[in-house]
Structure formats: C-alpha cells, structure tokens
Amino acid sequence: MNKYFYILVLLVFNISICKSAYTTKLCNDTPSKYLEISNVTVEPYPLVPGHNVTLQIQGKLIKPIEHGSVRITGKYLFIRVINEQLDICSKDLECPIPIGPFVFSYSSSLPPWLPSGKFYGEISAKDGSSESITCVNFSVDL
C-alpha cells in the first residue's frame, strides 16, 4: 500500500484520540463582567451512572460578589436529572467573595438508570440583583 495512506491513517487515529473529553462554552458567548474563566472541568470522564459527577469552574473575579445564587441543571435527552439552586455564599465560599482567584465546585450523584449517550448541563450564577456573574454550558459523554 501507499506510504501516504499509512500516514493518513495515523493522523486520523491521533486526531480521534486527542478529541476533548467534554465541551464547555459560555452561554450566549457573553463574557462576564464579574469573572474571567480560565478552566472548567467535568469529572470523571466518561460519566458513570449511579456515581458522582464533579463540576468545577476556575477563574479570576474582576468584581467582588456580595451575595447571589447558582443554578445547576443537567439533562439526558429531554430528562432533567440535575436541577439545583444554591446560595453562592455556601460553606465553601464565604461572602463577600473578594477580587482575585476563584474556584467553584459542585458534586452530585447521577441516577443509576442512565444509558450511554450525551449528557448536557448548565451552570449559571447571578448576583443578589439578578445580574449574571457567569453562565457555562457543557456536554459530556456518559
């Protein structure tokens, strides 16, 4: 066979291995005036039905947060399997949250009945006057 064919096969194989485990993006591609996000992680990958999933947002706060809320939703197909609203000033984050490095983590268990496929979610945070702090969409394999 042609040596270029083997090179092409190797390139395709490497590209398929290097695909991202999950995708994340800002909702409506709108940057926040509160938070510059540097990293979003979803673990484990792939997700395991009946086990915990941990979501983490890391970044830098540009503006202090006095109080607010975080909504976390997760869907499989059209079925909502995670739907929580939390006070942003929880046991892990005490308000006011000052300007500087910022880490928000959330863990929840997935229902054991979920079949394999794509899992979609959103993390959105608002301050006390309902102004958006950030909003991130993600999708991950199950």
Image (spheres, rainbow, N blue to C red):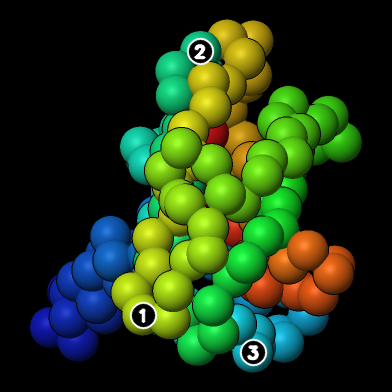
Asked whether residue 22 appears in the rendered view, the answer is no
Seen as rendered, the residue at the extreme left is 3
Left or right for 47, reference 34: left
Residue at (45% x, 61% y) in the render: 57
Q: Distance between the residues labelled 1 and 3?
A: 13 Å
Q: Nearer the viewer, mark 1 or mark 3?
A: 1
**What residue lies at 28% left-to-right and 66% top-to-bottom?**
18
| Number of the front mark, 1 or 2 | 1
Q: Marks 2 and 3, how far apart in space?
A: 37 Å
The amino acid beneath tag 2 is Gly
Q: Mark 2 — residue?
A: 50
User: Which corner quadrant holds the N terminus?
Assistant: bottom left
Q: On screen, 108 above or below 60?
A: above
Residues packed near mark 2 inside 10 Å, few (<14), some (14 to 19) or many (20 plus): few
CA separation in Å, label 1 and label 2: 36 Å
Q: Tell me which label, 1 or 2, sits earlier in the chain.
A: 2
Specify the label residue 108 is tagged with.
none
Q: Name the residue under label 3.
A: 33
Please state the horizontal and vertical placement of residue 24, each as a whole percent of the image: 55, 66
> On the image, numbered disc 1 is attached to which residue?
100
- Give the amino acid type for the residue marked by disc 3 in the picture: Lys
Mark 2 or 3: in front is: 3
Q: Identify the secondary structure beneath mark 1.
A: strand
- Tell me where residue 79 appears, x and y as whole percent: 83, 29
State the image quarter where residue 84 is shown. top right
